[in-house]
Image (spheres, rainbow, N blue to C red):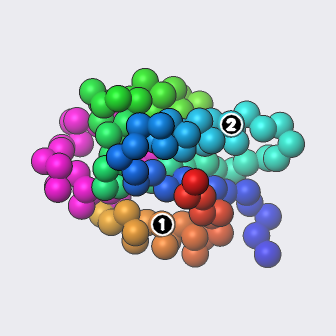
Amino acid sequence: MLDDNQTVFHLASSDEGHQELVLTLAENLTQDDTIDMDDVAVLAQAEGIEPVRADGEGSDHVESLIDSGVTIKACSNTMEMFDLEESNLPDGVETVSSGVGELTRLQNDGYAYISP
């Protein structure tokens, strides 16, 4: 059994309210003093990439999460689909080759998977 508390939130919806919910839940987890978190990550793919764009709706929230230590990951396949470059992302956003591959890897590494 792993002693690390690690959680990944899956951000894949085009719905702005849902996107904000995912980001807020990640933020709330980092502020919960009842659990010692080792890592909180948000994986954005498909239409969920919008708030992870530097000029996207919700990008201020993403930048705030990065500043608070949340790991933000963007799917390279999605970026290619939407003609996005790394320069279109806020500083600190990591790119991964495949969103589903990264989710699989993180879960194998003991991350709790949250898809609200």
Residue that sits furthest to the right in the current view:
34
Quadrant in which residue 45 is drawn: bottom left
Relative to 8, is 16 on the left or the right? left
Give the label on residue 28, or none.
2
Contact, CB < 8 Å: mark 1 with mark 2?
A: no
* CA distance for labels 1 and 2: 21 Å
Residue at figure coordinates x 59%, y 36% from the top left:
24
Left or right: 75, with 88 as reference point: right
Residue 93 visible from this viewpoint: no
- Local SS, label 2: helix
* Along the line of sight, the residue nearer the viewer: 54 or 93: 54
On the image, numbered disc 1 is attached to which residue?
103
Residue 31 position in % (x across, y down): 73, 34
Quarter of the image for residue 32 reads: top right
Q: Which mark is residue 93?
A: none
Circle 1 SS class? helix
Q: What is the x, y in percent for residue 13?
A: 40, 51
Task: Report if residue 86 lies within the magenta region.
Answer: yes
Residue 115 vertical position relative to residue 87 in the rendered view, above or below: below
Choose mark 1 or mark 2, whichever is in front: 2
**Residue at position x 54%, y 44% from top?**
22
| Amino acid residing under circle 2 | Asn
Instruction: Tell me if residue 8 comes above or below residue 50 in the rendering.
Output: below
Give the x, y percent position of residue 16.
41, 37
Highlighted range, magenta: 71-96
Amino acid type for the residue under numbered disc 1:
Leu
Total residue callouts: 2
